[in-house]
Amino acid sequence: MTTRIRRFVETDTGHRVPNHRSKCRHIHGHRYRFEAEIEGDVVTKKGVSEEGMLIDFSDVSHILQVHIHDIVDHAFVVAESDHELLAILEQLPTEHRTVVVPFIPTAENLAKWAFEQVEPHIETAYGNSLRLVAMHCRETPKSTASWYAN
């Protein structure tokens, strides 16, 4: 039997889906919620701070903060193939936060991207099994995409 936990971080991030048939092809933004889902066995080592936990929630928060929030919060995510928008963004001052990615920045692709950013950092110091099993990317209150480990 394993236990699962979830922890999330939220970002305010701009993007567009350039080939989309609806208004999503226009420049806009979302209050994204990136939620890490971790499973494993609880720490059984007596007397340690994490006894009874998979991993301390604050450790997960730190990972999400550094590897997702600090990269895309108040930034504009743009596909490297979106030459039209890249030309426009290049006109902005150098302090503008543009994140160029090798994919169309849909919720589905951002969930996979976030998983890949976070997964290498989910580890334990106590020998309990621990792994990132999914990353959920909520784009709107009604729309969430998830990427699951194989």
Image (cartoon, rainbow, N blue to C red):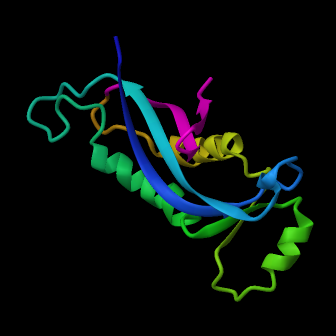
Residue 98 is situated, as x and y percent measured from the top left of the image, at 69, 71
**Residue in the image at 29% along x and 50% along y:** 58
Left-right relation of 10 to 115: left
Residue 147 is situated, as x and y percent measured from the top left of the image, at 62, 33
**Residue in the image at 42% along x and 46% along y:** 8
Compared to 139, does 40 lie above or below?
Answer: above
Q: Does the magenta segment cover residue 144?
A: yes
Give the image quarter of residue 18: bottom right
**Residue in the image at 85% along x and 69% along y:** 85
Residue situated furthest top in the rendering: 1
Compared to 78, does 37 lie above or below?
Answer: above
Q: Evaluate whether residue 130 shows in this view.
A: no
The C terminus is located in which quarter? top right
Which residues fall within the magenta stretch? 128-150
Compared to 4, does 35 lie above or below?
Answer: below
Residue situated furthest front in the rendering: 23
The front one of 135 and 49 is: 135
Compared to 69, does 57 lie above or below?
Answer: above
The front one of 1 and 83 is: 83
Q: Evaluate whether residue 15 shows in this view.
A: yes
Residue 6 is situated, as x and y percent measured from the top left of the image, at 39, 35
